[in-house]
Amino acid sequence: MSELLAESSKKATSSVQDVGEDKPPFGSRGRRCLEPERVDHVPPPDDQVETIAKSLSKQRLAPVPLEDKQKINEKPAKHWDNFYKMNASNFFRNRKWAGNSVFPLLSANNNPQLRLHAYDYASHAVKLVQSDPLYLSPPVGTIHASVWDVTSPDSLPSDITPGTVDIVIMVFVMSALHPDEWGRAINNIHKILKPGGVVLFRDYGRYDLTQLRFKGGRLLDENFYMRGDKTRVYFFELDELSLLFTGAKASPDTRHAINITTTQVSQEDDTGHCLDLEVEFPGQMASADSSSPAPRDEGVIPSSSSYPLGIHPNLLSPLANCPPHPLFTAEQLGVDRRLIVNRKRQLKMYRVWMQGKFRKL
């Protein structure tokens, strides 16, 4: 779900940490390590390239049949509707499902002028929001939720005047779209925002644990998958996000990385949605060391990939259904890499998320 909101006070800290800094900014999302006194980044293990190549090779041997691809892509909102119906009781649990940004914002808000607008193309997700006590009686500010497809070719939300929105929050939104829909989504977000308005973005990163766990019969296209509940998910590279919003690859000035040592117990339901339950242990808070090596580039994987540059071909030419770039400037692009330890199963796993801040030109 994407949330559109009026800008209020500015945050002084960020969870994206520049790996060149000696210490993480106060308030950054460092976590405690499993081993006491151990403070370090968490780059992928030495055998990660081999692990990725093996997983992708197996997935490519049994892709989703063509006729099934067409059915999956015809009515994506239907599958998300079914997802929310099946998981209504878990919908607003922290760190559980995407789309629960709006109520924490509403709970923490002290600005009576703040107006929140929440949208989803799954009608049942909107009903869940509308039935929440905070929605029915917000403590401060206002909130309105309705059904809207961010990829709509000919309509914007009826309660939004184009060019008036301060901030758009997109948390696990773009990954649910077909790559052919990306241009319409960027176009609509650009129309809604006022000049200087901001997009706050978070989504799945390339070769995240979830991607590598997919078995046969799930691969729709390169880095694009169907879960067991028929919802879709794409796994991004930083350059792809930069190309989406700015029309150019990421510059060194905007590239950041988070490498956080986190101890968690990871569970996965039978649909392919990964659930993380955090468990902290005594130890030092993770911090950056300027002498630490930069994270290894996971983008070059020996495989038979049809995308040799690791970039979707839709992004290597002008984006369809979208005005010419540049539309945004990238103020921040981050890779959030986290170590997850399942102590019961004695497994170490690596999560990868992308995070960005883009400002409308």
Image (spheres, helix red, strand yellow):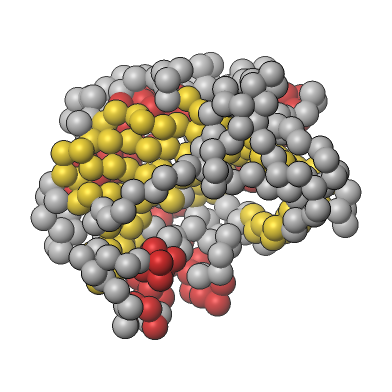
Q: Residue at x 56, y 69 (%)?
A: 93
Q: With 34 as the anchor, is 227 left or right in this view?
A: left
Q: Residue at x 28, y 36 (%)?
A: 359
Residue 221 in view here: no
Choose top left, top right, bottom left or bottom right for residue 324: top left
Q: With 169 as the anchor, is 52 left or right in this view?
A: right
Q: Position of residue 103 (x, y in %)?
A: 41, 68
Q: With 83 as the anchor, is 177 left or right in this view?
A: left
In the rendered view of the protein, which quadrant contains the N terminus?
A: bottom left
Q: Residue at x 73, y 48 (%)?
A: 32
Indicate whether 320 appears above or below 106. above
- Relative depth, front residue between 227 and 61: 227
- Relative depth, front residue between 38 and 130: 38
Q: Which residue is drawn at 51% across and 75% down?
A: 88
Residue 325 in view here: yes
Choose top left, top right, bottom left or bottom right for residue 183: top left
Choose top left, top right, bottom left or bottom right for residue 292: top right
Q: Where is residue 165 in the image (x, y as percent from the top left)?
A: 20, 51
Q: How many numbered discs, if any?
A: 0
- Relative depth, front residue between 79 and 176: 176
Q: Position of residue 81 (x, y in %)?
A: 43, 67
In the rendered view of the protein, which quadrant contains the C terminus?
A: top left
Indicate whether 70 appears above or below 308. below
- Relative depth, front residue between 68 and 177: 177
Q: Where is residue 203 in the image (x, y as percent from the top left)?
A: 49, 44
